[in-house]
Amino acid sequence: MSSTTILLDRNRQFASDFAAADLPVLPRLRTVVLTCADQRVDPAHILGLELGEVAVMRNNGGRVTEAVVEEVATLAFMVAKMDGPEPRPWELVLMQHTKCGAERFADPDFQRVLKEHIGVDVSSSAIADHEQSLREDVERLRGAPGVPGYIVVSGLLYDVQNGRVREVFAPTPLGSFAS
Ligand SMILES: [Zn+2]
């Protein structure tokens, strides 16, 4: 049986008692989680999310790439429009995890092989040290013109072997991070 068939079966079950038709466009907790696409790192499970509470962005490693900066800037613009004259802060949670495949991207030989074979540069997604790459991600956001300083950013590290999340840095307005 194809996995799509399995997933559609599960959706029929989900839709059979659907009760979330009137959820607002903005997430109820005014929060976006950026994390890895890894199947072991599903924020809905790890962070106990209800439908409609948090927006989730995922990529290889959960890193702030140029594409993520553009998405965050676009979101910030849209949220500010919806908030009206007084834009209110919202939170961006950067959550990396142990045993991440993006740790392999830190190997210069692996980077070179990927570049040669598929023409993809993964250097901006590489993770050699989680705390350092979380701080680099904050710097990438701070340096982006479309990302407002009032966004509150935190850095978390999820341990895939014990299920615990550790706070690497506490929620802080982007504009208040020490450079
Ligand atoms: Zn990962």
Image: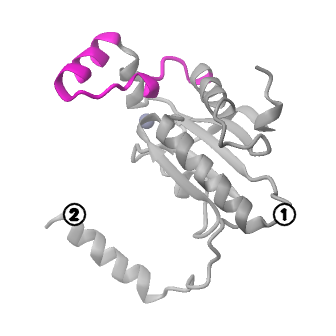
**Camera-side residue: 124 or 100?**
124
Amino acid type, callout 2: Ser
Q: Is residue 88 left or right of residue 103?
A: right
Tell me the distance, in whole angstroms, between the alpha carbons under discs 1 and 2. 47 Å
Mark 2: which secondary structure?
helix
Tell me, yes or no, whether the highlighted magenta stretch contains residue 122. yes
Q: What residue would you read off at disc 1?
A: 85
Q: Is mark 1 within 8 Å of ligand 1?
A: no
Using a 10 Å C-alpha cutoff, classify the residue at mark 1 as few (fewer than 14 neighbours), some (14 to 19) or many (20 or more): few
Tell me, yes or no, whether the highlighted magenta stretch contains residue 47. no
> Which quarter of the rendered image does ligand 1 occupy?
top left
Q: What residue would you read off at disc 2?
A: 3
Q: Position of residue 179 (x, y in %)?
A: 76, 19
Instruction: Write the start and end of the magenta stretch as one range.
Output: 108-131
Q: Position of residue 49 (x, y in %)?
A: 60, 61
Please say whether residue 107 is visible from this viewpoint: yes
Mark 1: which secondary structure?
loop
Residue at x 53%, y 56% (from the top left corner): 45
Extreme residue in the left direction:
1
Please say whether residue 160 is visible from this viewpoint: no
Extreme residue in the right direction:
86
Using a 10 Å C-alpha cutoff, classify the residue at mark 2 as few (fewer than 14 neighbours), some (14 to 19) or many (20 or more): few
* Above-or-below relation of 46 to 13: above
Q: Position of residue 36 (x, y in %)?
A: 46, 41
* Above-or-below relation of 126 to 13: above
Marks 1 and 2, the one that precedes in the sequence: 2
**Camera-side residue: 108 or 76?**
76
Magenta stretch mostly in which secondary structure? helix
